[in-house]
Amino acid sequence: MAYGDGPDDAPLREAWEQFCDRLKLAGLSAFKDANPANPLQRADAFRFLTQNLGQAFDLALETKDPAFPMIHPFVTPTRKLGGDVADFTYRQAWIDGAHAYRLTGRKGTARWLNVTVQGPRPATIPGTDWPSLHEPFGDIPECNILGTQIEADANDNFELFIGGERRDRNWLPTTPGSRKLFIREAFDGWDETPTALTIERIGMDAPRPLPSPARMIEAMDWAGDFVTGLMRDWPEHSWLTSRGVCDPKALNQFPADKIANDASDAKRGRMAAHMVWRLEPDEALIVEMDMHPGFWIFGMGGAFVGSMDFLHRPVSYTPARTRIDSDGVVRLVLAHDDPGIHNWLDTQGFSDGNLTYRNLLTQDAARFRTRVVPRDRLMEYLPADTAIVTPTERATMRIERYRAIKRRYGV
């Protein structure tokens, strides 16, 4: 048997060749103006693409049938996407408002959990003529439930029902347009554990059908849209559309209004702000925030806004892991090498990148101040009681991070 012997050989081959052509085209975006022309960041652009190539058909085919749902972790220590922030985990499941589902799990000890039903994905962002972000994003939150609102038994086991008849507890309604379940969990201390989850459609009574040639061709087309879209849209789409992003030409500062906080953000359970930074080899950047209640996270990202190497490097901070100065100010230091400051954010050698702030649980707006200073005079610009760490202490912090992150993902 050879090519041409099967009735669907020609359309399958054409669809595959089109996908390969689009993948080749996507790679050209590694050289876009938004990605600095230094060796590490050029290579990182291709890493961003290849990491997501690895999940293209998981999203397009393997988990795509809402009659046979599966929870898919679309961000991991080896896969970054969607402006993800270290100390979050991100999972999704394709659903359909025509079905009802049971989400079964056991609560972990992470400080924050949010499960959201996402609705239709419009061609443009509502109220604007801006195109929606590429798949699987761009859909609109319809309703959500926080982990603290999910009732569990004495052993922290629970069932959460999605769609179907109204229930008095542990239930999220769906609409005819509901298409995705979006699950985010955020961690503060290194000792916190993740929530174990699985999903099934209520009433499943037959095995999932094998993909037909038509379904395979559809998946190739979706995957082609995915790889070209992610390379095209990041970071420019966020610059254009997000209220939490400062003008990218206004480097090393947060936006004047400091937060994105509309109705959709409320359903996502967050407040957000974002800074684009650039540092010369001999510079450091001090970021100050007046300490406020709640649960906040700072996370570093590369040019394509994917999180930096949070498995091995100090690229994120939360209240439990941050030293607060005696004047009540949180001070973080971005630098290309370890300055011996406890709250060091490692640039991992990148000249440019992103720093994202998330605030959960409260509506306290942060007050940010930033200052670029000479790296060799950094201590002159910090309080005398700034928390210092030795190389041995930094190594201990690094291995503590490494073990905790691996535990979160079960890797």
Image: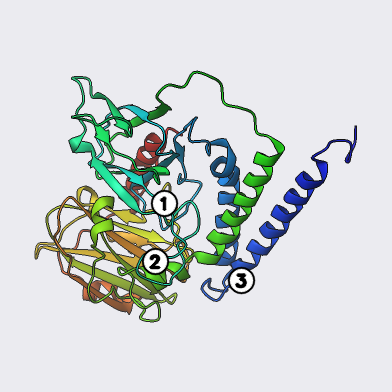
Question: Residue 122 versus residue 33: which sits nearer the camera?
Answer: 122
- Image quadrant in which the N terminus is located: top right
Q: Sequence-wise, which precedes: disc 2 or disc 1?
A: 1
Where does label 1 land, which residue? Answer: 120
The part of the image, by quadrant, that contains residue 24 is bottom right
**Residue 343 point in image, percent of width and height:** 27, 59
Characterize the local packing of mark 1: few (<14), some (14-19) or many (20 or more) Cα atoms within 10 angstroms. some
**Residue 296 point in image, percent of width and height:** 22, 54
Where does label 3 land, which residue? Answer: 31
Characterize the local packing of mark 2: few (<14), some (14-19) or many (20 or more) Cα atoms within 10 angstroms. many
Residue at 54% over, 43% down: 59
Characterize the local packing of mark 3: few (<14), some (14-19) or many (20 or more) Cα atoms within 10 angstroms. some
Real-space CA distance between mark 3 and mark 2, rounded to the nearest whole angstrom? 18 Å
Image height of 344 relative to 6, above or below: below
Where does label 2 land, which residue? Answer: 354
Mark in front: 2 vs 1: 1
Image height of 245 relative to 185, above or below: below
**Residue 29 point in image, percent of width and height:** 60, 67
Asked whether the beta carbons under mark 1 and mark 3 sit within 8 Å of each other, the answer is: no
